[in-house]
Image: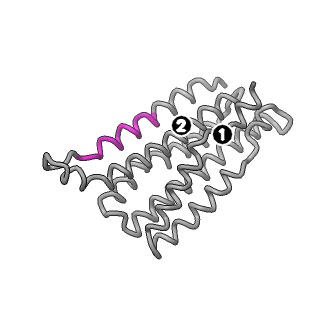
Amino acid sequence: MNKGRLEAFSDGVIAIIITIMVLELHAPHGTDWAALRSLLPSLGLYALSFVFLGIYWNNHHHMLHAAERVNGKILWANLHLLFWLSLIPFTTRWSGETRFASLPTAAYGVVFLMAGVAYSLLERAILRLHGSGSRVHSALAAGLKEKISMVSYTAAIPLAFVDPRISWALFILIGVMWIVPDRRIERTYR
């Protein structure tokens, strides 16, 4: 099965998710700096969510570049990932509108934890199709960043009910950690 349609569909869905997210931003009611300053938390949250979507898009692109083909299991695993990514605008807006209250913060963490689980399942489906001796297998071997991310998201969810600032600090650290691109695929396919 050709992977081109899967890539194009995924790119389109992620572009729509980003568009929805930016449409959720509201212009300030005033025309001075104070009016804009009141929107800074929402703008910062949008930027963080945009970075996360960019990270997913970038890594998804590299992973599919490494794959030689796809099958039905990969298509469904990819839809599972896109489902969780599609919830990002909702939790982003909810967190911003509630000024980072506990439950919306925990929901934000759940969405990103589940997106991470879905990404891992997609990666495993690709690895199963290509086999353990394949070139893609060596390119996609699980790394430390994935493990740190999953543990951090898992910790951030209950910590949101202790102090949401701890959760947001963890989210920001995960984003900063992933800003540096994953070089495993590039090293394998040089």
| Residue 16 falls in image quadrant | top left
Kind of residue sitting beneath label 1: Asp
Q: Name the residue under label 1.
A: 182
Q: Position of residue 47 (x, y in %)?
A: 40, 46
Q: In which quarter of the image is residue 137?
A: top right
| Residue 83 in the image: above or below residue 108 | above
| Residue 168 forms part of the magenta stretch | no
Going 30% across and 52% down the picture, which residue do you hit? 40
Q: Which of marks 2 and 1 is nearer the N terminus?
A: 2
| Residue on which disc 2 sits | 57
- What color scheme is it? one colour
Task: Answer with left or right where residue 42 lies relative to residue 9.
Answer: left
The residue depicted at 25 percent of the width and 53 percent of the height is: 37
Question: Which quarter of the image is occupied by the C terminus?
Answer: top right
The answer to whether 167 appears left or right of 155 in the picture is left
Give the residue at the far bottom of this rendering: 162
* Furthest residue toward front: 33
- 100 vs 80, left or right, is left
Q: Residue at x 68, y 42 (%)?
A: 123
Magenta stretch encompasses residue 25 = yes
Q: In this view, does 176 lie above or below 57?
A: below
Give the answer, above or below, for where 54 lies relative to 144.
above
Q: Which amino acid does label 2 sit on?
A: Trp
Q: What stretch is highlighted in magenta?
A: 13-26
